[in-house]
Image (tube, rainbow, N blue to C red):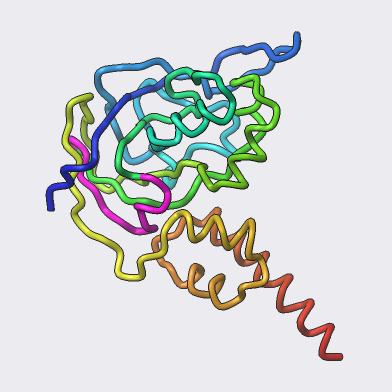
Amino acid sequence: MNSLNHEIVWLSKGTPSTLTYKGKEYKSGIAKNQVSELNVTLNGIIGDDVENHEFHGGSERVICVYAYEHYGFWGQLYQHILPKAAFGENLTLKGMTESDVNIGDIYQIGEAIVQVSQGRFPCSTINKYTNIPTLLNKIIEHGYTGYFFRVLEEGTIYSNSSIKLLEKHPKGLSISTIHHTFFHDKENIRQIEAILSLDTLSKEWKNRLNKLHNSITKNSDKSLR
């Protein structure tokens, strides 16, 4: 299945560096440089890293993706042009927003075969890096978080590589659906259970949704007493 409307805009990578926000230093891997190729392995991208390995990186979050379409939205909202790879993503793509991709979808990008594993859980570093203090809240409000690929087959992704959809996951639960459920529809236990049934969802997001599910069922039990 050729995906003619899918396109790589930027490839980016970088290792943690010391940055400054309001006169205070912090260390983060969010600052990426544009490159012509990414050498992708099962556990990471060569020459790319994160600062906090507890909350970032790992085999289920190898490639960070952000939709190019959202840059126009943020530019209009804040009257400010964001830098390339402003969200610390490795792949900036056209035609692959959070509503376009489902957990478990499999793509071939260049030589690599990858699978959508989870949405991104955004943190306040994005506010510091862009110097926009309300950006994190707006990302959560609109669901423009970005998402991650796990790597099924290693290989090189080039700036002119094609993107092919190899397999669409049959349950069809998009990144947008999961984000909306977790942040804006927390009492929807049927939807939470449907998401938890996905064997291709990352352990991180299964843990988050299991905790949410447990809190709902406990509250329900209390109300019946």
In this rendering, position of residue 61 left or right of residue 184: left
Q: Which residue is drawn at 39% across and 61% down?
A: 200
Residue 201 in magenta stretch = no
Image quarter of residue 209: bottom right
Quadrant in the picture for the C terminus: bottom right
**Chief SS of the magenta region:** loop
In this rendering, position of residue 42 left or right of residue 147: left
Image quarter of residue 20: top right
Depth check: give the residue in front, 223 or 200.
223
Q: Which residue is drawn at 69% across and 72% down?
A: 214
Depth check: give the residue in front, 116 or 182.
182
Rendered position, 177 above or below 2: below
Residue 71 locus on image (x, y percent): 45, 30
In this rendering, position of residue 18 left or right of residue 222: left
Residue located farthest toward the top when viewing the structure as drawn = 23
Residue 84 locus on image (x, y percent): 42, 20
Q: How many marks?
A: 0
Q: Which residues are drawn in magenta? A: 97-111
Residue 29 locus on image (x, y percent): 53, 23
Rendered position, 178 above or below 85: below
